[in-house]
Image: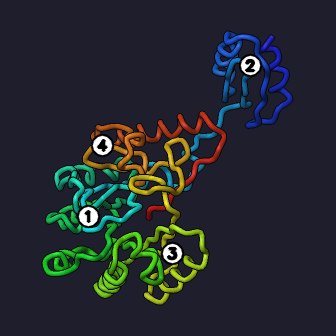
Amino acid sequence: MVILDLVEKLSATAEGDTITLPIATPDQAALAASWCERTGNTLITADETSITVRRGRPPDPIATLPAARRPGARLWLYTNFDCNLACDYCCARSSPQTARRALGVDRVKEIAKAAPAAGVTEILLTGGEPFILPDLDEIVAHCTAALPTTLLTNGMLWRGHRLQMLQAMPRDRLTLQISLDSATPGLHDSHRGKGTWAKAVTGIRTALGEGFTVRVAATLTTDDLHEETELRSFLDALGIAREHQVVRPLAHQGAADDGLELTVQTLIPEVTITADGVYWHPVGADNEEQLVTPNIFPLDAAIDLVREKFRYHRSKTDSAARTFPCA
């Protein structure tokens, strides 16, 4: 009877729409699942009392995304996890006391070499604070030789040999992304440490003065729209183009006590590699629930696994997945 009901109801239903029918036994749910598989329809949910079925198959969720946001287009590499700061909402729990967990030049070289053939169009280097690493120049060289690269930094360590390292980096294939959370020191320093706002602004000016393309990223910990307006005006005055101003909400990950809940079920993945393996998204690189596989290589297989898991999670829900702009 359940199959007859499905045929009758779905025949009067538009492609992509759903119906819910009552069932009497678990066997009827299994029967409906088998029928859907054979007929090209989709069983959305089934419990002890009802089933929900979509007419037809859902479109490939990856194909519906802009090319630049498809899983694997942007590849994040956590070069290390230690940092000169201890921001109180850091998604990676980075601090001066955090273990380095360096990805290492050799692995980065292998990743960068394999990335273009795996469909990667941009590499993003993050931490921790990458400029702590003595071999960051080699890491950047391998990445920029393969693809356009963005390097995330707090911009506070550019003195002596680290300034020389910065000055030797290529301008044409490298974007520097520096963190700045507010137009004045108060809010920024309350989360990142006293005096850090002034150092970050100095870093932005140094990077611009050296001829780099500079992107500035802010984490807003308040709903006060005035803060964002003031910040954007300040960045305008510094010479940061609007398309290079990234303003994002706080994510409830890592050291953060609150913020947006971001899970593999709700978040469009951006493939992220650490020394520990391949993760769903850079905001979850300290979250075991977002570890996809400990196997970085072959790189194309690791990226394909993330894509397949994304398709699986999208097949289990009708709710929209969201992007979270780390860069």
Q: Which residue is mark 2?
A: 49
Above or below: residue 63 compared with residue 293: below
- Contact between marks 1 and 4 (CB within 8 A): the answer is no
Foreground: disc 2 or disc 4? 2
Q: Position of residue 291 (x, y in %)?
A: 37, 41
The amino acid sitting under disc 2 is Thr
Q: Which mark is residue 277?
A: 4
Left or right of 244? Residue 6 is: right
Q: Which residue is mark 3?
A: 243
Report the Cα–Cα distance between label 3 and label 4.
31 Å
Q: Quadrant of the N terminus?
A: top right
Foreground: disc 1 or disc 4? 1
Q: Position of residue 19 (x, y in %)?
A: 78, 29
- Badge 2 marks a residue whose secondary structure is loop
The amino acid sitting under disc 3 is Glu
Report the Cα–Cα distance between label 2 and label 1.
53 Å
Q: Which residue is mark 1?
A: 83
Residue at 50 percent across and 61 percent down: it is: 250
